[in-house]
């Protein structure tokens, strides 16, 4: 059996699980059964893919089934790029399934989640395997619809219904863009197979148009600014393990679509493409993190961070395009490897963080950080795992987030050799944006972790939180361990990515596993190198030493004393820093860039005993300037076209007649 | 000999257009139905001539269908309907005969221009037949648009169908299935619309469509 066939059987098993979930939907065992089945299938597929990656790197197998369009059939293909993305998908799927074993027990409507969960996993696997435009779009739409159903799980909530609606509109828009892109790629003769598309030459105008459409289609699914509006609404609305899948994995499938179209199908890129991609990526990173800083809903904050990380990935892809057009294949391979490495990293730590948010939600029934606090005492294990995720996403060594961002910076430093002046200016500017976003992300996660887990509980719910079950903790610790592993052994990942860069760009980064002491060297040893293990050992050593010194030489007497209380002996948790007060300095600086921030202070006059109030209102500029006009135009058009529903029969006949005459006249005049 | 065959085909098709024009200015329903019957006879002749020309015996069936259904059964049935409805003596004012005729001439010119340009590489007989057929279709539509009376609209619709049949038979090698389906679609449309006429009549005591509009409110 070829590798593709094995994977297709795994997908069939997932679809079978979905059908079984429908049949069993109301039974009590369904939750355990479905999640364990999904975990086992994804785990087996993951193992198989890893063995495939190690055993036959760079091999390509394909298979076509007599499904779909009669003259086309359904083509599937497993090449290095698909292998890598399938590893990401199945890793995230397995982790989310394990987490679901525990988290799913608290689900009030399991029959709305289970069938779609398995089907969603199958859909994401299928998109990556698809090898013709029809199958790709069909599976893409299947993935969108199943995830939409998951977003709508708790549809009684008005907010969720709105989120689902906006998600559906944006998903349809994205699919339309991709449909047009594939239509252009297939050309007038309609060669929908990817092999045929790859073989044809595309004119520069068509290729540019396809790039724009791919940016719109895949970008709207991935959450590229300004197409990100659905993401912070839809991701928090779904159950937490589904949020983890949508944020961590589905956005990666969108990136897969972009990479497949732009790097594989479209042929040789033009240099200005990289300019567009870099610009959008840079904007996304900074705006995403600024949006995230303003949030006090934990899951929404994480969703906005996805926008930031997607931006980082797009920066890497843009750099790869820039180097590829200028025949700097080594640098292009470095940039692409950095982007793909970040794809893997983000899928791991974003899943971890969403699992943590889900654990907090289970324990306290609260997503609003302003109502949390002090959870580190009640939920020590969750706090630790969440902290690891925070450190990883803030790109601090020795975890994996640092490595991929560092590699991206290494690629940025190569830009001085680019011949185009606009790129020479653009790339360092984007590097500045990337650095800014990394710093802001760290601030954001200091806020997220500090307000949620440190300090004192702000509500009784937070004060009575209980540690979550062992499955949830297990999933979180697996992800945390992977973050650390990828951080201290990045050479393995980079070498695993080599077949992908070889197949797409024709070059690879230097072999890393042969370098002593597990260092990584992106270009040459003389320029730069990084050793995660060394950093980790140093941190571990110095921290142990400091702890030892403190415990050995400091006083052992434990003293509890009143904190500085500003003259008020009654210390209320309300006097702590809140999420909004933490973000206020940054809101002052950047708020007007992204939001129209209005801060209003309502101070009662002396003698009045009502409390003073500070109200900050935020309005999303992108929503107001880009989306509201469209909404208004659609409403206006609908209002006015509504009249057409109430015409007389004669008028309808007249309309038909006049339309026909007009079309004939156009034909007569034009031909 | 070749030329005469073509000329006969053209004059028959042209006759259909001419009869369509005649229908435009009839202000009495019985006369309108009679002229429709004449058009159907002409259609049957034209189709039969095409059958002879193309050596396509199955087209004789189509011609027969046109002759029996459209030239006999439907006109007789329509005569009965308008008698039952009691509107066979009514004069239906046709507004603006002159302007309607001018629009009709414009439509014929338009269809000639379009068809002769678009079908540049088709056989000459088919080209001109298609042009005539499109004229008949457009004139049928024009009649549907200008008539206020439901029976007038039914006849306009069926005259439009005549144009379709003419087009279908003018093109060589059209399978019979299409023609039978077209013929039956006309019959079905006739039955449906006939039933509708009685329903309208039951409800509102008139088949004048403007009366129907007044019941919908708003307009």
Image (cartoon, rainbow, N blue to C red):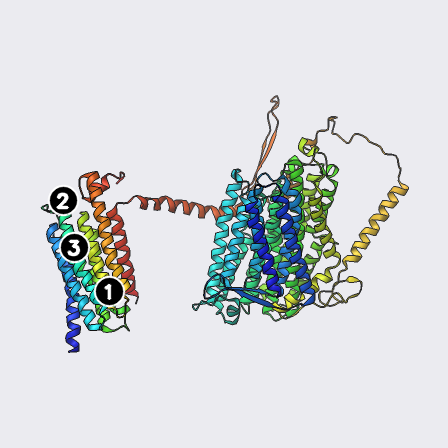
Query: The C terminus of chain B is located in which quarter?
Result: top left
Rounded to the nearest whole Å, what is the CA distance between mark 3 and mark 2? 16 Å
Callout 1 crowding tier (Cα within 10 Å): few <14, some 14–19, many ≥20: many
Task: Please tell me which of labels 3 and 2 falls first in the chain.
Answer: 3
Residue A218 sits in which quadrant?
A: bottom right
Tags 1 and 3 both on a single chain: yes
Callout 3 crowding tier (Cα within 10 Å): few <14, some 14–19, many ≥20: some
Q: Residue furthest bottom?
A: B1
Q: Which residue is mark 1?
A: B167
Nearest the viewer among A460 and A321 is A460
Q: Which residue is mark 2?
A: B84
Q: Answer whether residue A170 is visible to the viewer in this image.
A: yes
Residue A536 location (% of width, % of height): 79, 54
Tags 1 and 2 both on a single chain: yes
Residue A532 location (% of width, % of height): 76, 57
Rounded to the nearest whole Å, what is the CA distance between mark 1 and mark 2? 35 Å
Q: In the rendered image of this protein, does residue A269 appear above or below residue B185? A: below
Q: Which residue is mark 3?
A: B73
Tags 3 and 2 both on a single chain: yes
Q: Residue furthest right?
A: A553
Nearest the viewer among B58 and A563 is B58
Residue A515 location (% of width, % of height): 77, 66
């Amino acid at each position: 059996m070829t590798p593709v066939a094995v994977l297709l059987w795994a997908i069939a098993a997932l679809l079978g699980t979905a059908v079984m979930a429908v049949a069993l939907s109301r039974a009590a065992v369904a939750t355990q059964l479905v999640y364990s089945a999904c975990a086992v299938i994804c785990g087996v597929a993951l193992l198989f893919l890893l063995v495939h990656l190690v055993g036959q790197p760079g091999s390509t197998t394909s298979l076509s089934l007599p499904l779909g369009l009669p003259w086309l059939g359904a083509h599937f293909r497993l090449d290095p790029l698909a292998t890598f993305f399938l590893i990401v998908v199945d890793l995230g799927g397995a982790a989310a399934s394990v987490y679901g074993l525990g988290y799913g027990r608290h689900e009030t409507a399991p029959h709305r989640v289970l069938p779609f969960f398995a089907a969603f996993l199958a859909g994401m696997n299928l998109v990556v395997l698809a090898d013709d435009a029809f199958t790709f779009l069909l599976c893409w739409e299947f993935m969108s619809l199943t995830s939409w159903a998951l977003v709508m799980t708790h549809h009684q909530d008005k907010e969720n219904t709105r989120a689902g609606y906006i998600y559906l509109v944006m998903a349809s828009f994205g699919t339309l863009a991709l449909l047009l892109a594939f239509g252009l790629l297939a050309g007038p003769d309609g060669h929908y197979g990817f092999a045929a598309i790859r073989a044809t030459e595309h004119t520069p105008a068509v290729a540019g148009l396809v790039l724009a459409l791919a940016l719109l289609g895949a970008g709207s699914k991935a959450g590229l600014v300004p197409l990100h509006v659905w993401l912070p609404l839809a991701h928090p609305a779904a159950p937490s393990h589904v949020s983890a899948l949508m944020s961590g994995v589905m956005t990666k499938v969108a990136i897969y679509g972009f990479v497949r179209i732009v790097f594989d199908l479209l042929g040789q890129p033009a240099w200005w493409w990289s300019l567009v991609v870099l610009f959008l990526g840079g904007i996304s990173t900074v705006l995403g993190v600024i949006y995230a800083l303003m949030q006090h809903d934990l899951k929404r904050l994480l969703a906005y961070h996805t926008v930031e990380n997607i931006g980082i990935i797009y920066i890497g892809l843009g750099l790869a395009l820039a180097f590829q057009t200028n025949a700097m294949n080594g640098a292009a391979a470095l940039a692409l490897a950095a982007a793909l490495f970040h794809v893997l990293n983000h899928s791991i730590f974003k899943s971890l963080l969403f699992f943590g948010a889900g654990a907090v939600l289970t324990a306290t029934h609260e997503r609003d950080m302003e109502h949390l606090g002090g959870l580190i005492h009640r939920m020590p294990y969750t706090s630790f795992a969440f902290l690891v995720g925070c450190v990883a996403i803030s790109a601090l060594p020795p975890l994996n987030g640092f490595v991929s961002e560092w590699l991206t910076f290494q690629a940025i430093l190569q830009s001085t050799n680019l011949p185009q002046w606009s790129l020479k200016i653009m790339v360092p500017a984007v590097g500045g944006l990337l650095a800014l976003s990394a710093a802001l992300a760290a601030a954001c996660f200091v806020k997220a972790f500090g307000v949620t887990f440190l300090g004192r509980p702000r509500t009784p719910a937070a004060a009575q939180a209980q540690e979550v079950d062992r499955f949830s903790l297990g999933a979180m610790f697996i992800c945390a361990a992977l973050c650390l592993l990828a951080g201290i052994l990045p050479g393995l990942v980079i070498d695993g990515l080599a077949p992908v860069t070889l197949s797409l760009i024709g070059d690879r980064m230097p072999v890393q596993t042969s370098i002593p002491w597990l260092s990584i060297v992106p270009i040459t040893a003389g320029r730069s190198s990084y050793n995660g293990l060394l950093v980790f050992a140093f941190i571990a050593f110095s921290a142990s030493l400091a702890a030892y010194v403190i415990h050995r030489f400091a006083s052992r007497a434990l003293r509890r004393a009143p904190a500085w209380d500003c003259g008020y002996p009654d210390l209320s948790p309300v006097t702590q820093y809140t999420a909004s007060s933490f973000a206020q300095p940054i809101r002052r600086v950047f708020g007007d860039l992204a939001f129209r921030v209005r801060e209003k202070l309502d101070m009662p006059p002396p003698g009045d005993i009502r409390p003073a109030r500070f109200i900050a209102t935020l309005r999303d500029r992108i929503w107001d300037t880009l989306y509201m006009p469209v909404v208004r135009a659609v409403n206006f058009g609908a209002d006015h076209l509504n009249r057409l529903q109430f015409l007389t029969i004669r008028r309808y006949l007249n309309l038909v007649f006049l339309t026909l005459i007009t079309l004939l006249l156009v034909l007569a005049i034009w031909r | 000999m070749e030329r005469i065959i073509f000329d006969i085909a053209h004059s028959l098709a042209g006759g259909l257009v001419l009869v369509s024009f005649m229908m435009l200015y009839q202000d009495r329903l019985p006369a309108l139905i009679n002229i429709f019957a004449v058009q159907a006879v002409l259609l049957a002749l034209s189709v039969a001539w095409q059958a002879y020309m193309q050596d396509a015996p199955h087209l004789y069936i189509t011609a027969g269908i046109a002759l029996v259904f459209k030239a006999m059964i439907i006109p007789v049935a329509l005569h009965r309907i308008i008698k039952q409805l009691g509107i066979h003596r009514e004069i239906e004012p046709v507004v603006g005969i002159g302007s309607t005729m001018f629009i009709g001439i414009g439509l014929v010119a338009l269809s000639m221009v379009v068809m002769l340009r678009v079908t540049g590489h088709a056989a000459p007989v088919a080209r001109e037949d298609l042009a005539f057929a499109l004229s008949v279709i457009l004139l049928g539509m024009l009649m549907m648009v200008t008539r206020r009376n439901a029976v007038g609209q039914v006849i306009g619709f069926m005259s439009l169908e005549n144009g379709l049949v003419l087009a279908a038979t003018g093109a060589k090698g059209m399978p019979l299935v299409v023609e039978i389906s077209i013929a039956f679609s006309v019959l079905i449309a006739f039955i449906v619309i006939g039933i509708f006429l009685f329903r309208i009549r039951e409800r509102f005591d008139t088949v004048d469509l403007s009366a129907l509009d007044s019941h919908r409110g708003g307009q």
